[in-house]
Image (cartoon, rainbow, N blue to C red):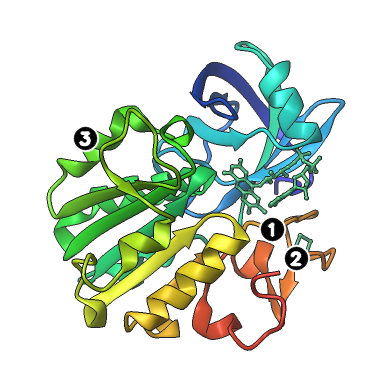
C-alpha cells in the first residue's frame, strides 16, 4: 500500500496567469490519480514546504491535474515566483470526501464562489457538466473585487452556453471595463434576482470565511434550509488525514470529513466562520 505521507512526482507542464495573484499550474502525474471534485491534494515544493490545494481540473483526468493557486505566503510565493515549466514537485492525496454529487441528482445546484474560491468549484462545475442530464439546473454565481481578479475568464462563455446553466458575475467596485453587476456576491442571491427553485436545490459555496458567513446568512434569508447548504471549509491543515487534530469544527475533521461540509452538521459549533 502507498505511504500516505510520501509524495509522488508531479511535473509542471504549463503555468497560466489567471490574475495578478492567481496562477493555474498544470501537472503531469507520475502515477494515475482518481479524485472526486472537492477532494484536496497536499502539494510539496521541495526544500520549501507543503500546502493543501483542491484540484481545479476535471475529475477523471487521471494522468494530469490542474491546481489554481493564490499567492499568499511562503509556499505559494515560491510557486508563483520561482517554479517553472519542467520543475518536478510532489503531490500526495487525494484527501477528504469531496462534494456529495450523488445527492445533487435531480436537483438544482446553486454554486457560489468568491475570488480563488472558484478554483475548487471549477472541478465541481466540470463534474456537474458531465452529469447535466441528471440535474435540473446549474446556477453559477461568482464575485471578485475587480474584473482583474476574475479566474478562468476565457471559459465563461463556454459555461454559460452549457444546457440548463446560468452564470452570474459581480464585482465589488465599479471598473471602467465592466457593464455587469456591482456589489458583493450576496447581491446575486437577492430574492428578486435568484432564479432558483429553493425547495428543490442544493447550494455549494467556496471563498473567504467572511464570504461564507454572509452567503450562508443570505441563503437562509431567501429560504434555504441548513441541510441544503454545503460550505467548502478550506482552512489551515497539516497531516490531511485526521491524525494531528488541527482542523476540527466540533467532532468533524475538515481534512477527513470535509473539506466540504453541510451547514446543518456544523451550524451549532462556535468556530464555523472563525
Ligand atoms: C482543503 C484546502 C483546499 C485549498 N484549496 C486551495 C486552492 O485550490 N487554491 C488556493 O489558492 N488555496 C487553497 N487553499 C489555501 C492554501 O492551502 C493556503 O493558501 C496555503 O496553504 C498557504 O500556504 P503558504 O505557505 O503560501 O502561506 P503561509 O506562509 O502559511 O501563510 C500566509 C498567509 O496565508 C494565510 N493562510 C494560510 N493557509 C490558509 C488557508 N488554508 N486559508 C486561508 N488563509 C490561509 C495565513 O494565515 C497567512 O496570513 C486550500 C486550503 C485547504 C485547507
Ligand atoms: S489536518 Fe490533521 S487532523 Fe485534519
- The reply to whether the residue tagged 2 has its Cβ within 8 angstroms of ligand 2 is yes
* Secondary structure category for the residue under label 1: loop
Q: Give the class, few, some or many, for how many residues have Cα within 10 Å of label 2's Cα (few <14, many ≥20).
A: many
Question: For this view, does 136 lie left or right of residue 204?
Answer: left
- The reply to whether the residue tagged 1 has its Cβ within 8 angstroms of ligand 1 is yes
Question: For this view, does 58 lie left or right of residue 17?
Answer: left
Given contact means CB atoms under 8 Å apart, are the residues at marks 1 and 2 in contact?
yes
Circle number at residue 247: 2
- Frontmost of labels 1 and 2 is 1
Could you tell me which residue is drawn at 56 percent across and 84 percent down?
A: 265
In the rendered image, the vertical position of residue 202 relative to residue 77, given as above or below: below
Quarter of the image for the C terminus: give it: bottom right
Reading the image, the residue beneath label 3 is 158
- The reply to whether the residue tagged 3 has its Cβ within 8 angstroms of ligand 1 is no
Residue 56: x and y in percent read 47, 40
Closer-to-camera residue (95/22): 22
Amino acid at each position: 500500500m502507498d505511504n500516505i505521507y510520501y509524495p509522488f512526482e508531479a511535473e509542471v507542464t504549463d503555468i497560466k496567469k489567471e490574475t495578478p495573484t492567481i496562477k493555474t499550474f498544470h501537472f503531469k502525474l507520475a502515477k494515475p490519480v482518481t479524485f472526486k471534485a472537492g477532494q484536496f491534494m497536499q502539494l510539496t515544493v521541495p526544500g520549501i514546504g507543503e500546502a493543501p490545494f483542491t484540484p481545479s481540473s476535471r475529475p477523471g483526468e487521471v494522468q494530469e491535474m490542474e491546481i489554481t493557486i493564490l499567492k499568499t505566503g511562503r509556499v505559494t510565493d515560491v510557486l508563483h515566483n520561482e517554479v517553472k515549466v519542467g520543475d518536478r514537485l510532489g503531490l500526495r492525496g487525494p484527501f477528504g470526501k469531496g462534494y456529495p454529487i450523488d445527492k445533487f441528482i435531480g436537483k438544482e445546484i446553486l454554486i457560489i464562489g468568491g475570488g480563488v474560491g472558484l478554483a475548487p468549484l471549477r472541478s465541481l462545475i466540470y463534474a456537474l457538466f458531465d452529469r447535466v442530464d441528471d440535474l435540473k439546473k446549474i446556477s453559477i454565481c461568482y464575485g471578485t473585487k475587480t474584473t482583474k481578479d476574475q479566474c478562468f475568464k476565457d471559459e465563461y462563455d463556454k459555461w454559460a452556453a452549457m444546457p440548463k446553466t446560468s452564470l452570474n458575475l459581480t464585482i465589488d467596485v465599479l471598473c471602467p471595463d465592466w457593464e455587469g453587476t456591482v456589489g458583493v456576491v450576496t447581491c446575486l442571491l437577492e430574492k428578486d434576482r435568484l432564479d432558483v427553485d429553493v425547495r428543490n436545490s442544493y447550494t455549494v459555496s467556496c471563498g473567504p470565511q467572511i464570504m461564507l458567513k454572509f452567503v450562508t446568512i443570505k441563503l437562509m434569508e431567501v429560504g434555504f434550509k441548513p441541510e441544503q447548504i454545503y460550505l467548502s471549509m478550506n482552512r489551515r491543515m497539516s497531516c490531511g488525514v485526521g491524525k494531528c487534530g488541527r482542523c476540527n469544527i466540533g467532532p468533524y475533521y475538515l481534512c477527513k470529513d470535509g473539506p466540504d461540509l453541510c451547514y446543518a452538521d456544523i451550524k451549532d459549533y462556535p468556530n464555523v466562520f472563525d
